[in-house]
Amino acid sequence: MEIDLIPTDDLANRCVEESLKKQPARRDDNFCFELVRRAFALDDHYALGHVLTVYKDVWSRFWIRDANLFDTQSLTIDDFKSIAFMLVYQHLKGKAFDGFSSLIPLLAYFRVALVRTVAQYLRSSKHKQLLWQLTLNDDPNELLETIPAPENPRVESEKNIVRQEVEKRIAYLLPDENDRLLFDCWAKQNLSRSEIVAVYSHIWGNENAVRVALQRIRRRIINDPPLNDLLGELL
């Protein structure tokens, strides 16, 4: 049966089954991605309920250390998960979801959103003591999530996929070919405005034209939460 024809309940069950497999190489992420696609791109609220359950019970289990410490707080870790999930949903629902094509970058987005939501709360003055308890080595600057060693080949493989998704997201944000060319000149080749005009004067006649176009491109990129969170996953 084609994956888009699988009933939502069956799809959710298969998503959980695949997510619980201990060996990433044996997982088939297509079931979870299709479930999220229905929830976000198609605004299917029934599918959304399933995604929220998988997100809370499976995907995010190890993203925050010592979650039991939240039991004494006005907000529980489950509350934080719900808040972060709805923030992601608001950013990605509808056409905004088109910038994603696989599950790993989506999980990266979810994870960064959760960590940031918790961090913003804990870094307020009244919660600094809890932040201190949550971090390793008594260092409050430690990231709240567990990060595998950088030499881990699986981690590098996932980061390569995230990098590819960054490229796809930029292409989605900059549908105009000239905008993509200018972004490449500025961000990748590090060309000055005068150098860009010297090479592409038939597109941008002077430095002011380059400056105006770059301002527009920067605004579009900087104001895109999905791209910012994907970039944050690469840091």
Image (cartoon, helix red, strand yellow):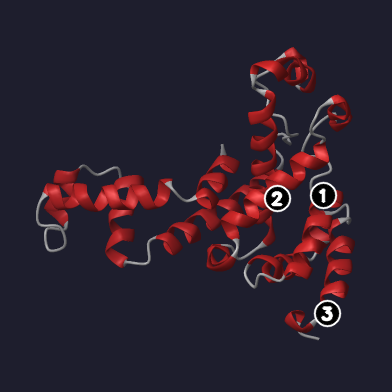
Name which residue type carries label 2: Phe
Find disc 1 in the rendering and name its residue: 56
Q: Quadrant of the N terminus?
A: bottom right
Report the residue marked by disc 3. 7
The first of marks 1 and 2 along the sequence is 1
Q: CA distance from mark 2 to mark 3?
A: 23 Å
Mark 2: secondary structure = helix
Q: Earlier in the sequence, mark 1 or mark 3?
A: 3
Q: Is residue 172 left or right of residue 141?
A: left
Cα separation between marks 1 and 2: 9 Å
The residue that appears at 65% across and 73% down in the rendered structure is 42
Q: Tell me what residue is drawn at x 79 percent, y 53 percent.
A: 55
Q: How busy is the neighbourhood of tag 2: few (under 14 within 10 Å), some, or many (20 plus)?
A: many
Which label's residue is closer to the chain start, 2 or 3?
A: 3
Residue 48 image point, x, y percent: 75, 64
Please provide percent x and percent y for residue 227.
51, 50
The quadrant holding residue 156 is top right
Give the number of marks: 3
Give the foreground label among 2 and 3.
2
Mark 3 surroundings within 10 Å by alpha-carbon count, few (fewer than 14), some (14 through 19), many (20 or more): few
Residue displayed at 82% across by 42% down: 78
